[in-house]
Image: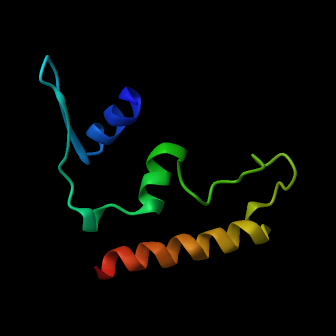
Amino acid sequence: MRKILQTLDKKGLVKLYKGKNGGSLLIASLDRIFLPGLAEIFQGKLNECILENKICPDRSACILRKKINAVEKCENNKKRKK
């Protein structure tokens, strides 16, 4: 749990307080937090090759990658509109 909170602290989403009365506080507004963004923080870009280029050397022709890119683009557009 500590590593998760430290990562969120580095990204400016939470503030951590040390000591006897320490803890964590959500400092990012909820309209700034989206599931795709959290996934990217912990797993990297959604459109990275899940096969690590071991099977298909031509990433530009990957059908799955094109679909994931489309979903990621749609989610990013939703974030910008809010």
Q: Is residue 22 left or right of residue 37?
A: left
Q: Is residue 29 left or right of residue 77?
A: left
Coordinates of residue 70 in the picture (x, y in percent): 60, 76
In the rendered image, the vertical position of residue 45 relative to residue 66, given as above or below: above
Q: Nearer the viewer, residue 5 or 71?
A: 5
Q: Residue at the right extreme? A: 55
Marks counted in the figure total 0
Q: Residue at the bottom extreme? A: 81
Name which quarter of the figure residue 20 lies in: top left
Q: Is residue 77 left or right of residue 29?
A: right
Q: Quadrant of the C terminus?
A: bottom left
In the rendered image, the vertical position of residue 48 relative to residue 16, given as above or below: below
Coordinates of residue 68 in the picture (x, y in percent): 64, 68
Question: Residue at the location (53% across, 70% down)?
Answer: 72
Question: Residue at the location (50% across, 79% down)?
Answer: 74
In the rendered image, the vertical position of residue 43 relative to residue 2, given as above or below: below
Question: Residue at the location (40% across, 35% down)?
Answer: 4
Q: Nearer the viewer, residue 35 or 43?
A: 35
In the rendered image, the vertical position of residue 38 relative to residue 80, given as above or below: above
Scheme by which the image is coloured? rainbow
Q: Quadrant of the N terminus?
A: top left
Name which quarter of the figure residue 62 lies in: bottom right
Q: Is residue 47 left or right of residue 12?
A: right
Q: Residue at the top extreme? A: 20
